[in-house]
Amino acid sequence: MSPRIAFLLLLFANNLFAADALRVLDGKHLRLTTDIPASAEVDALPALFDLAVPIWCEWFCVPIEKVADWKMEGCLVRDKLNFRDSGLLERVPELRTGFQFDNRLWVLEPKSDYYRRHLLLHEGVHGLMWYLYGELGPPWYREGLAELLSTHYIDGGKTDGVKLELAIIPRKREDVLLWGRVKLIHDDCNAGKFLTIDEVMTLVSKEYDDPNAYAWSWALTMFLATETANDNGGNVMLQMTKELSPTIPRDLKRFNGKVKELIGSEKFAVLQKRWYDFASQIDYGYDVQRTRIESFVVGKLIESGVKPVRVKSERGWQNSGYSVEKGKSYRLTASGRFALDNTPSKWWSQPNGITIRYHNGNPIGVLLMAVVTDKPDAGSAFMKPITVGSGIDYTATESGTIFFRINDSPNSLENNQGEAEVKFSRGIQDK
Ligand SMILES: [Zn+2]
């Protein structure tokens, strides 16, 4: 072997076994040690973290001055071996995604620019809450809030000189690679593992070994924040954060009781019904405004000659104002013409739907009905709607109020136009 080749081999072997150098990236609120080589994306992480801090402060209703001295010591870890001599991973439990303790955080490199930022912000929310309150609240609240305030959109997809938006429903899957919360919820719904609000609120820490618990907690905090938003920019998630210190009830039952008390029992009963539709339909670009169900008022019983009902194509479920009685039969007849999309051209539909495009197993444009009872799980009717199409003879299996919607994806309502009209008459085969 020539001395030159021997030298090259030695150089190669040394590189193979040498640890990658640790680099320190410093910002105002985060000092990040990492073994990931320099790149614009990774090197901008402390700046991104600093962009999030004023938004978090708004969410926690604290002035930015209150966190002027707050700084996290973070590790972004690609290979734990690279950190073995640094002492920075000592006493950290097995790192699977991220971890926070006091003013320290650790993130395991996830090989997705989006998810790397997400995990860093998630642990940052825990760190800030710990700094502000010395308390994170029960599992659904602490993980839900951390998920809510780390799910983000960056203008242009880059971290330099950009606008950061938090607490968003991601618009496209490609914007949030590896995040996966929507899919986890869909998978659970399809497997019959739908969780009610109370079931999410009583998840215990151990259940967060499973990423699905994070997905449900994110969905619930998103739901509660939007559905309880008031004109002053407040919502029940924030009200609870204000309660965190010093009066936070440590006990899960009392904490959840306080949330329900702040929402009010009447509103909470409405949210319980609405939750079935929100959680089972949550999707990228989900349209919170247009899917909101505006009224759950119990409808009048259908009598002969009642006025027809109009169903808007650009909205989610709509209360018809009428109710049916168990055992009685009714004839429903639907008509109308509406447009369901405008790219590349309008899809005109009638209440029978367009049978070459489907959403949730039904043609888009088909008229659907749900009968909402007064039972606690009444909202589950939205998850198994009855197909009306251009008309049906319907014998009520339960008494309840009729809701209608024109089937379409909840991220594609904005471009709809027109309405269906539904006429009712009483059937003749009443039992
Ligand atoms: Zn967490």
Image (cartoon, rainbow, N blue to C red):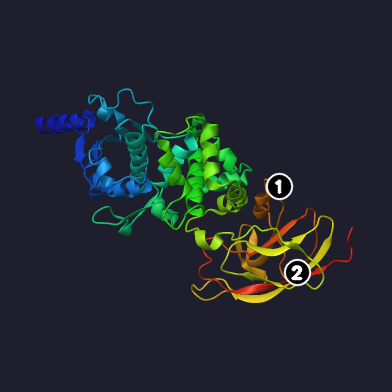
SS for dot 1: loop
- Tell which residue pokes out farthest to the left in this image: 3
Q: Is residue 364 above or below residue 55?
A: below
Amino acid carrying label 1: it is: Lys
What residue is shown at x 47% (from left), y 30% (from top)?
Answer: 250
**Quick one: label 2 or label 1, which is nearer the N terminus?**
1
Quickly name the residue at label 2.
391
Q: Which mark is residue 208?
A: none
Q: Nearer the viewer, mark 2 or mark 1?
A: 1
Viewport quadrant of the C terminus: bottom right
Quick check: can you spot residue 60?
A: yes
Q: Nearer the viewer, residue 324 or 244?
A: 244
Q: Quadrant of the N terminus?
A: top left
Name the spot of residue 129 as percent of width and height, x first. 36, 37
Instruction: Please name the residue shown 49% across and 31% down the image.
Output: 205
Residue 370 position within the rendered picture, expressed as x and y whole percent measured from the top left: 69, 58
How far separated are the C-alphas under marks 2 and 1?
Answer: 27 Å
As drawn, is 295 to the left or to the right of 181?
Answer: right
> Which is nearer the eye, 198 or 119?
198
Q: How many marks?
A: 2
